[in-house]
Amino acid sequence: MSSVSAYYNGKNVLITGATGFMGKVLMEKLLRSSPDVKAVYILVRPKAGQSMQERVANMLKCKVFDRVREDCPNFHEKIKPINAELTQPKLAISAEDEEELLTRINIVFHCAATVRFDEPLKHALQLNALGTQRLLELARQMQNLEAFIHISTAYANCIRKCIDEIIYPPPAEPKKLFDLIEWLDESIIEDITPKLLGDWPNTYTYTKALSEYLIQQEKGNLNIAIIRPSIVGASWHEPFPGWIDNFNGTSGIFIAAGKGILRTVIANNEAVADMIPVDVAINLTLAAGWYTAVHRPKNMLVYNCTTGGINPFFWGEMEQYVMSTFKRNPLEQAFRTPNAHLTSNYLINQYWITVSHKAPAILYDLYMRLTGRKPRMMKIINRLHKSMTLLQYFSTQSWDWSSENMNMLMSHLNTEDKKLYNFDVRQLHWSEYIESYCLGAKKYLLNEDMAGIPAAKQHLRKLRNIRYAFNTTLLVIIWRIFIARSQMARNIWYFVLRKEAKDFLMLMAIGDTCFT
Ligand SMILES: CCCCC/C=C\C/C=C\CCCCCCCC(=O)SCCNC(=O)CCNC(=O)[C@H](O)C(C)(C)COP(=O)(O)OP(=O)(O)OC[C@H]1O[C@@H](n2cnc3c(N)ncnc32)[C@H](O)[C@@H]1OP(=O)(O)O
Ligand SMILES: NC(=O)C1=CN([C@@H]2O[C@H](COP(=O)(O)OP(=O)(O)OC[C@H]3O[C@@H](n4cnc5c(N)ncnc54)[C@H](OP(=O)(O)O)[C@@H]3O)[C@@H](O)[C@H]2O)C=CC1
């Protein structure tokens, strides 16, 4: 009998960020593993011309809900969308909705955030820090709240090398920053952002560190836990192996490498690639929700949700597994044969960027122009370089996260829960996981059918022949230019030709003698 599943049955759960990557997996698992959950309230904003209702209706059609749709066909009736905007005062929730939440909610899962590394500081502060503070304010007034679970990131304290499961001093006093963004012109905030960030690599990690501190300061009597996942990757098992729906973290890099666009990456082969499958992070989150509500630990617990200390995996290994998967299962219409390499040397990386990224992009765009089409490869390459610059902070260093609370939580699960909410990362086989991740990216992100693999292989053979023909032509042209310009080169060339001719005639003569 599962204690965790049983706990959620009959409960009213509130999820922020339910339309996002982790939020969807959380909602799906909750509805599937606790089919008698009373209701799942989700805070949703209207977006891109779609009303909240339209967005939710479209979201529920997603593949990620196929399993729960099959197991519980009426699961959608449990979902109660609430119009909200986390950057607005009182989260822009209507008085009527607020009343409903205050009286009903038993558990809150706070997933909403901007995860962009290049988010302007003002917006990142408004959403990640101020939004969290406002949600806490709401939660403090909830009459039946049993637990509040905040999703942070393992990199919130990335300026430290060893990260324990504690709250560290914040990079700045959050209230002072909130005052600052209130009256300071946005362009001035942009100008002083690097100074404010200090050692933090981006506004994302900076504001996530602030939100952890805010929670500690303002939790009051709430029962809170903080989950810190590292790089969240495609699902390991649930709802489907390899399920992924965005280009964040490593996903976009895998695809760019698989398409043959990305050939060189700044990364340290020996540094730990701390990746956690999304279903593992969600299993831990649900188990932590149960533990926080039922066991009510005296102190707020922080769970580092990482793999490096338990089952380490390195960027160099990742390169091998990704390349080997895409060579065996190519992506359709690749730009070039997949062949990406990691280097920690800046100059070597710059060399390959020029030779393997920019030069082919320029040639391809020239070809597109000549054939009357719109050039686009250089634009893609420039975007890729911008992403790589933002990501390299994470791919060139290793961190040590302690995982005592993760182990403690596992020891509190019964046998059934250990299976149903598996977050034992010792069982992860990285080569199998990365293969399934790459295939998931092919299927779910690019909508490519596995039946198209023979055609994709044929396309790669065509690319190889084009490369051979191109390299041979280039060699001949270079040689001809060289010969035309240098007397010495001509002399060597004629000497080689004469020697070849002499050897050939001699062979003919020997052949004649033998056969007569
Ligand atoms: C071959 C071996 C590989 C080895 C790998 C080596 C190194 C990997 C390096 C590092 C990974 C470390 C990651 C650390 C994560 C830390 C964990 C966290 O806590 S953070 C959570 C994760 N957050 C992120 O990852 C955010 C990072 N992204 C950004 O900040 C921004 O996206 C950006 C990188 C600044 C790019 O911004 P830009 O405005 O240029 O683009 P958009 O994101 O708006 O995307 C526009 C559009 O394009 C689509 N897109 C993006 N990438 C691709 C792609 N590769 N292929 C196809 N399409 C892509 C994207 O979906 C958008 O589409 P749409 O407009 O329809 O939404
Ligand atoms: N993905 C990763 O690698 C990692 C993620 N995390 C953390 O996990 C959490 C979830 O991340 P992930 O699912 O990847 O992120 P996504 O970007 O996929 O989802 C973000 C969610 O937040 C919502 N949101 C954004 N802005 C607002 C707003 N102003 N008002 C209301 N809702 C808003 C989005 O809604 P909408 O659809 O309307 O945009 C979306 O549902 C975050 O807290 C993140 O910091 C931690 C470690 C790694």
Image (cartoon, rainbow, N blue to C red):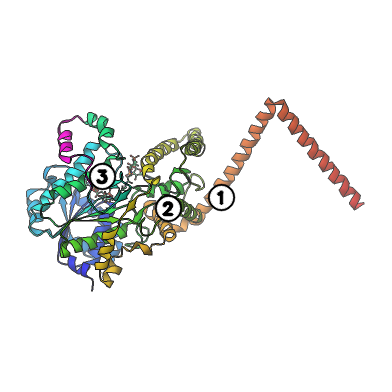
Query: Which is nearer the N-term, disc 1 or disc 2?
Result: 2
Side (left or right) of 241 relative to 359: left
**Which residue is pictured at 56% across the width and 47% down the height?**
462
**Which residue is pictured at 28% across the width and 44% down the height?**
205
Measured in 3D between alpha carbons, the distance from the residue under mark 2 to the one under mark 3, in whole angstroms, is 27 Å
Region in magenta: 168-185
* Residue assigned mark 2: 314
* Residue assigned mark 1: 461
The residue mark sitting in front, 1 or 2, is 2
Q: Is mark 3 within 8 Å of ligand 2?
A: yes
What is the crowding at mark 1: few (fewer than 14 residues within 10 Å), some, or many (at least 20)?
Answer: few
Magenta stretch encompasses residue 203: no
The residue mark sitting in front, 1 or 3, is 3
Looking at the rendered structure, the kind of residue marked 3 is Thr
Looking at the rendered structure, the kind of residue marked 2 is Phe
Residue toward you, 222 or 355: 222
| Relative vertical location of residue 8 with respect to residue 369 in this rendering, above or below | below
Query: Which is nearer the N-term, disc 1 or disc 3?
Result: 3
Name the image quarter holding residue 114. Answer: top left
* Residue assigned mark 3: 114
